[in-house]
Amino acid sequence: MLKRKTASALISLVLLAGLALAGCSSVSSSSLGAASSSGKEVIKFMHIWPEGSSKAQFSIVKNIIMDYEKQHPNVKIETEILNSDQYRDKLKVLATANELPDIGMTWSDGFINPYVKGGMLEPLDDVVNKDSALKDAFIPGVKESYAVNGKTYGLPLELNTSYVFYNKEIFKKYNLEVPKTFEEYKNVVKTLAKNGVIPATVGAKDGWPASFWFMYLADRIGGPTILTDVIHGKAKMDDPAILKAAQEVQTLVDMGGFVKDASTLSYEDAAAYFMYEKAAMFLTGLWQLPAFTTSPDVPQEFKDKVGYFKFPLYEGGKGTDINSYVGGPGVGLFVAKDSSVKKEAKEFVGFFLKEWGKKSVTDAGVIPATKVDTSKLKLSPMYMDILKDLNEASNVTTYFDTQASPAVSDLHHELITALFGKQVTPNEFVKRHANALAEEQKE
C-alpha cells in the first residue's frame, strides 16, 4: 500500500516538476532544428555541471565536446545542463515519457536499477572491452556499482568520499584542535556556538546533503556495514545504533551545531556559508574539492585557510576505524536504449571517459573513477593527501540513498529534512524508514 501511494505521489511530482523545469533548463548549444538541418548526427547530452556552480567541470565538458566535434565533423553534441536536484526531477519526467537524452548522467546501485528494469538503458560493456585504454582503467569495484545482472549500464566518472572541511583560521582563533572523537567534536561545537560562530553549515532542504551526518554517525555507532545490511534485509532500520545516530543529529541541532534554518537551505546555499567564512565547518563530498584546490574563481587566500579531517569516532561505537568512509561512486554516463544515434553516443562516451580521466585531475581537482598516475603531475597538497587517504581506506560505504530504491531514497530525503527541522522525532524517523523497507521486502 505504502509503495503504491509513494508511486502515485511520485507521478504527480514528476508532472509538476516537468512543468517547472520547462522554464529553467539550460540548453547550451544551437537549437534542435538548426543542428538537424546541418546534416550532422545530433547527440543530446544532459549533465549536472552548470557554469555558475561547477565551473571547472563545466569547462572540461565543454572542451571535451569541442575536441570531439573537431575530430568528428559529422557529429553535433547538444547539451542541456541542470543542477543535480533539477536533473533528478527532470530525468523522471523524461523516463515517464520515454524521452531520455541519448547520453545522460546516472548514479549507481538503487538509482540506476529502475531505469535498467524499465528497459531504458543500453549495456556499455562493449565500450570498455573493445578499448584497451579503458579495459583496466577503473578503480576496482567502482564500475561494478553500475552493473545489473552482470551487465554494466553506466560508466562512472568520479569517486566520492566525504570529509569535514574546516576553516583553519577560525579554529586557530578559538584555540581549537581537530576532533578525533565525537565528544571532542561536540566540545568544538560548544566553543564556536558560544562565540557566535556557526559551527557547521548544511543544506537539508533536499535531504541528501544533510544525510552525510546521519550516515557517518550510523557508521561510527553501528559499524561500517550497518546501513548496507539494512538495504539487504540483514539489519533493521530501527536498530538501536541507527536510532542513536538520529538522536545525535538532533542533539547537534539543539546545541546550535548547524546553520539556522538548515532545513530550508539548498546545497548551494549551505556551501556559500563556508565559502564566505560564515561557518567553521562543512561536511561534504569530494566534488567540492576543486573549490578548495584548483578553482580560479576562489581566492588563494581562502584556499590556504581550508583544512579537512575524517569524521570523528564515536566512543563505545562499533565503527572503530577512522579510515572507514561514507561515499562511493559519483555520477556516471548512460546511453539510452532507444537512442537513434546509439552507435555515435557510445563512441562519444568512450572518448569522454578517457579525456575526463586525464583532465579532471589537473583541470578540476576531482577524484576520477579511473586510476591516476600522479608521478608527473603537480597537484595541491590537499589533493595528494586525499589520494593517500583513499589508498589507505579500510571501507567505503555507498551512500544509503544511492543504495536504496528510488521510493525509499525519496522518503529518506524527506525524513532527513524533517529530522533537521525537528518535524519528526528520531523514533518516527527510524520507524517510517523501517515500514517502507518492510513493504518493499514483501513485494
Image (spheres, rainbow, N blue to C red):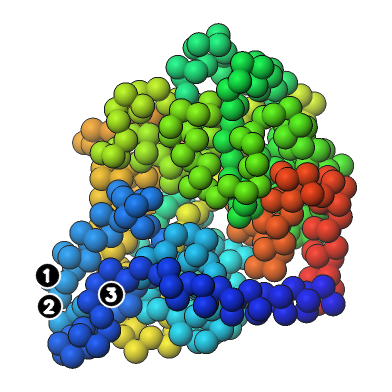
The image shows residue 329 at horizontal and vertical percentages of 50, 54
Question: What is the quadrant of the N terminus in the image?
Answer: bottom right
Residue picked out by circle 2: 73
Q: Is residue 341 above or below residue 63?
A: below
- Say which amino acid is labelled 2: Pro
Circle 2 SS class: loop
Measured Cα–Cα span from mark 1 to mark 3: 14 Å
Which numbered mark, 1 or 3, is in the foreground of this view? Answer: 3
Residue picked out by circle 3: 78
Q: Are marks 1 and 2 in contact (CB under 8 Å)?
A: yes
Give the residue drawn at x 69%, y 51%.
Answer: 417
Q: Is residue 128 above or below residue 140?
A: below
Q: Is residue 257 above or below residue 157?
A: above
The image shows residue 83 at horizontal and vertical percentages of 44, 59
The image shows residue 108 at horizontal and vertical percentages of 54, 62
| 433 on left or right of 288 | right
| 45 on left or right of 358 | right
- How many labels were placed on the picture? 3
Residue 174 placement: quadrant: top right
- Say which amino acid is labelled 3: Glu
Q: Earlier in the sequence, mark 2 or mark 3?
A: 2
Circle 3 SS class: strand
Q: Which numbered marker is on residue 70? A: 1
Circle 1 SS class: helix
Q: Are marks 2 and 3 in contact (CB under 8 Å)?
A: no
Measured Cα–Cα span from mark 2 to mark 3: 14 Å
